[in-house]
Image (cartoon, rainbow, N blue to C red):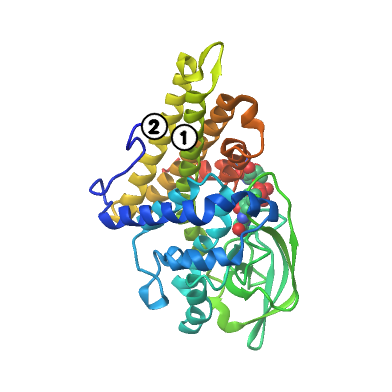
């Protein structure tokens, strides 16, 4: 591959030498700690706890969180760069579970009391606790305002009853950031709150879910039966958590886009090297124009998706856009990236032929992991509806 094809060097946009240094650090971490172990973790259907501590040693979980909590107070581009690099290992399950703090932790840091920050945020950033976000319920995930799990106030506690499902890191998590309905009389967005729930709280049961891909990630169905949660574990104002839930989705969508682009790049790299090696009809695959065109199509999609993603992220950081514009373009950047991944993984499997259907190739794994990114964090249909509304039609 030509040098720098997909690189975004320091000096371009808001990228600095610090982002470059982080990219190199994460790349080395992936080569040393992740790539050699993916097959074993997929077999185990989860990541080892030690990985979270090792990741914390390079500062991964604290990149964008305050230094007072053990983080490094970096900008959002840091998270994008790190997400892309981890995804380039070509294992979405690693991105999902190692990265579940990216969706579980921000509401805690934004809205938690000093006690909550000490008890939960600090150990998550230190890699000592695993964080998960629990919003989706068996009755539906897209219509967040319809969530039903009940948190009834009883003295100094909330008593939680109900279910959550498809929760990433749900089997291993020590800390759940849970969207609940605190006002039983309310319907829709009003009456929703965020609670921090300990993983070992009595009455919380977990059931492991099996799935098409992301095998290195544990996914759980959660049942809450009279789970008592201290009232101090409320994040922000009671009944007013809905906007926090929705705002959390925006950054999640941008990191999903970064993951999709990193994984697409892994497929492209594998397909290119296969096309250069494989011979059919007495010549290399790459000597066929149709294969070269397919590879260019793949590169075009990756490049376009990444360019849009960085533009949205940099305009967010520079506060250039009004919120509706940012929300609409975030939705579009996610769909552009996940569509690119779907097309690129499909093309890569085609170039690898039978080998692309065999366990052990990156393209086979990523091909099974494409769909989830078009569903999680807001399905394509939901995001297009959202973008249309934000753009005023
Ligand atoms: C592997 C995995 C990990 C996940 N991790 C988490 C997690 O950590 N935490 C968490 O809270 N959730 C998690 N989710 C849940 C995910 O966010 C939801 O699956 C997603 O929001 C969609 O909800 P749903 O599955 O209930 O689909 P539904 O809401 O039932 O929708 C079904 C389909 O119809 C589409 N649709 C829905 N309404 C409309 C409409 N009005 N018009 C047109 N189309 C529509 C949707 O886009 C979707 O494609 C995870 C899911 C998966 C698969």
Identity of the residue drawn at 45% across and 56% down: 29
Front residue of 55 and 236: 55
Q: Position of residue 158 (x, y in %)?
A: 66, 80
Mark 1–mark 2 distance (CA, rounded to whole Å) = 8 Å
Helix, strand, or loop for circle 1?
A: helix
What is the crowding at mark 1: few (fewer than 14 residues within 10 Å), some, or many (at least 20)?
some
User: Would the CB of label 1 be found within 8 Å of ligand 1?
Assistant: no
Which residue lies under the disc numbered 1? 269
Identity of the residue drawn at 53% across and 81% down: 119
Front residue of 149 and 185: 149
Which residue lies under the disc numbered 2? 1
Helix, strand, or loop for circle 2?
A: loop
Residue 141 visible (yes or no): no
Front residue of 278 and 296: 278
On the rendered structure, is 137 left or right of 129? right
Classify residue 351 by image quadrant.
top right
Identity of the residue drawn at 44% across and 48% down: 84
Q: Position of residue 93 (x, y in %)?
A: 59, 51
Q: Earlier in the sequence, mark 1 or mark 2?
A: 2
Q: Position of residue 370 (x, y in %)?
A: 58, 40
């Amino acid at each position: 591959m030509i040098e720098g094809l997909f690189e975004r060097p320091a000096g371009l946009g808001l990228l600095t030498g610090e982002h470059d240094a982080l990219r190199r650090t994460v790349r080395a971490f992936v080569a040393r700690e992740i790539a050699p172990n993916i097959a074993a973790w997929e077999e185990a259907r989860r990541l080892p706890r030690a990985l979270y501590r090792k990741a914390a040693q390079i500062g991964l979980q604290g990149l964008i969180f305050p230094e007072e909590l053990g983080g490094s107070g970096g900008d959002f581009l840091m998270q994008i760069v790190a997400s892309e690099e981890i995804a380039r290992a070509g294992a979405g399950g690693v991105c999902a579970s190692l990265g579940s703090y990216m969706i579980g932790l921000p509401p805690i840091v934004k809205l938690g009391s000093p006690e909550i920050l000490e008890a939960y945020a600090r150990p998550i950033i230190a890699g000592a606790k695993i964080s998960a976000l629990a919003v989706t319920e068996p009755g539906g995930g897209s219509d967040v305002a319809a969530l039903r799990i009940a948190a009834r106030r009883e003295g100094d506690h909330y008593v939680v009853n109900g279910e959550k499902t498809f929760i990433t890191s749900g089997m291993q998590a020590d800390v759940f950031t849970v969207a609940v309905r605190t006002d039983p009389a309310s319907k829709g967005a009003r009456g929703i709150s965020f609670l921090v729930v300990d993983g070992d709280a009595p009455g919380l049961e977990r059931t492991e879910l099996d799935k098409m891909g992301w095998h290195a990630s544990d996914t759980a169905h959660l049942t809450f039966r009279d789970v008592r949660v201290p009232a101090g574990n409320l994040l922000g104002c009671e009944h007013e958590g809905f906007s926090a839930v929705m705002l959390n989705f925006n950054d999640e969508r941008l990191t999903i886009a970064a993951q999709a682009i990193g994984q697409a790049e892994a497929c492209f790299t594998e397909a290119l090297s296969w096309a250069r090696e494989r011979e059919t009809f007495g010549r290399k695959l790459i000597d066929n124009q149709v294969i070269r065109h397919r590879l260019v199509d793949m590169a075009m999609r990756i490049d376009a998706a990444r360019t849009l993603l960085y533009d949205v992220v940099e305009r967010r950081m520079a506060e250039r856009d009004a919120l509706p514009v940012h929300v609409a373009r975030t939705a579009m950047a996610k769909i552009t990236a996940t569509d690119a991944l779907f097309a690129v993984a499909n093309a890569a499997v085609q170039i690898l032929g039978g080998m692309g259907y065999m366990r052990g190739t990156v393209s086979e794994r990523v091909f099974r992991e494409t769909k989830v990114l078009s569903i999680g964090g807001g399905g394509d249909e939901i995001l297009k509806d959202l973008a249309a509304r934000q753009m005023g039609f």
